[in-house]
Image: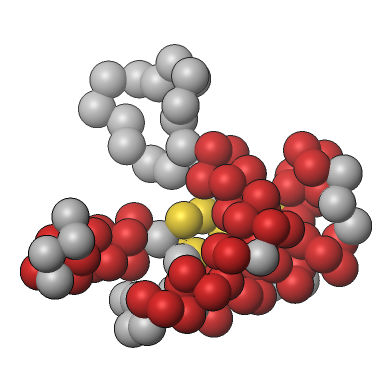
Amino acid sequence: MAIEDAWAVVDALADPETLYVFGVIAVGATHVGMKTEPGTRSMRYVTTFGVQRQTSLSREVVESAAARLKAVGLLDVVVDEERGYESWRVSEAALAAAAGEAVRQGRG
C-alpha cells in the first residue's frame, strides 16, 4: 500500500502513542544491531505482544496505534490465521514513495 495522503501520515504520527509504537515496530522489525548472514535481507515482523513487552502499553493502545498506522499506509501486515492476530513491519515501499514525493515537491 502506498501513502496517498502525506498529511494523514503526519497527523497519525503527531499522536505520541502512535509515534512511539511506530518507532518500536521500526526498530523491532529491522536488523539494527543484529548479526545477520551475508546476503540476508529479510525483515522480521513484530506482534502486538512484542510491542507491549517493549513499551508497557496496553494491548488496546498498541492495536489502536497500529490501526492508525495501517490506515495511512505505513505498515505491512501479516495475519496469523491460526492464532488470529496480526504482525507488522514498516512498509519500506510506502516510505520510499513518500520520500520520492517529498523530493519531487522540493522538500528533500
In the rendered structure, the answer to whether residue 72 lies left or right of residue 53 reads left
Q: Which quadrant is home to the N terminus?
A: bottom left
Seen as rendered, the residue at the extreme front is 106
Q: Where is residue 35 in the image (x, y as percent from the top left)?
A: 44, 16
Point 82% across, 48% down: residue: 52
Against 73, residue 92 (above or below) is above
Point 54% across, 81% down: residue: 71
Point 48% across, 19% down: residue: 33
Against 69, residue 5 (above or below) is below
Query: Is 5 or 90 nearer to us in this picture?
Result: 5
Colouring rule applied to residues: secondary structure
Is residue 35 in sight in this rendering? yes
Point 65% across, 75% down: residue: 67
Q: Position of residue 36 (x, y in %)?
A: 40, 21
Seen as rendered, the residue at the extreme top is 35
Against 6, residue 14 (above or below) is above
In the rendered structure, the answer to whether residue 74 lies left or right of residue 80 reads left
Q: Which quadrant is home to the C terminus?
A: bottom left
Q: Where is residue 56 in the image (x, y as percent from the top left)?
A: 87, 44
